[in-house]
Amino acid sequence: MDFLKMMKQAKQMQEQMGSLQEQIVEIEAEGTSGGGLVSLRLNGKGELKSLKIDPSLLKEEEGEILEDLIIAAHTDGRVKIDQAIQDKTQELMGGLGLPAGMKLPF
C-alpha cells in the first residue's frame, strides 16, 4: 500500500517538475547597481533580456566603472531570480510531503 502511495507521489512530483520548469523560464527579475545607473532584466534561465545604462556613464574614462556596475547589476538580478525560483519550487512542491531540506535539481 505504501509503495502505491509513493508511486502516486512520484508521478505527481514529475508532473509538477515539468510545470515548474516551464514557469521558471517565465520568471523575470531586475538587477540594478550604482544607485540605478545600470539596470538589467534577466529571465529564469539567467539570460539577459535588457540592459539600460545611464548616459552619464558613457564616457571613456568611466569604462572600468561601467563594467563593474554591469557585473554588479547582473549579480543582483541573478540573486533575485534564484530566490524567485526557490519560492516557486516551494510553492509547487510544498504539498508533496518531501523530507525537510531535500534539494531539487535547480
Image (cartoon, rainbow, N blue to C red):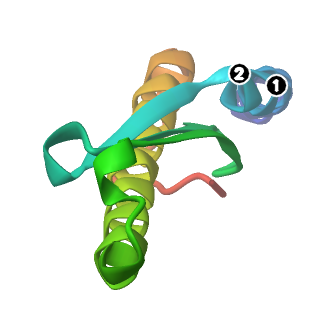
| Numbered tag placed on residue 60 in the rendering | none
- Label 2: how many Cα within 10 Å (few below 14, some 14–19, many 20+): few
Question: Measuring 75% from the left and 31% from the top, which residue is drawn there?
Answer: 25
Count the marks.
Answer: 2
Q: Quadrant of residue 80?
A: top left
Q: Which SS class for mark 1?
A: helix
Residue 68 visible from this viewpoint? no
Query: At 29% from the left edge and 50% from the top edge, which residue is drawn?
Result: 56
- Toward the viewer: 58 or 82? 58
The extreme left residue here reads 35
Q: Which mark is residue 26?
A: 2
Which is more foreground, mark 1 or mark 2?
A: 2
SS assignment at label 2:
helix
Question: Can you say which quadrant of the picture contains the N terminus?
Answer: top right
- Location of residue 6 by image quarter: top right
Q: Quadrant of the C terminus?
A: bottom right
At 23% from the left and 38% from the top, the residue drawn is: 36
Q: Type of residue at label 1?
A: Glu
At label 2, the amino acid type is Glu
The percent coordinates of residue 66 (x first, y second) are 37, 69
Q: Nearer the viewer, residue 85 or 49?
A: 49
User: What numbered label is drawn on residue 22?
Assistant: 1
The answer to the question of whether label 1 and label 2 lie on touching residues, with beta carbons closer than 8 A, is yes
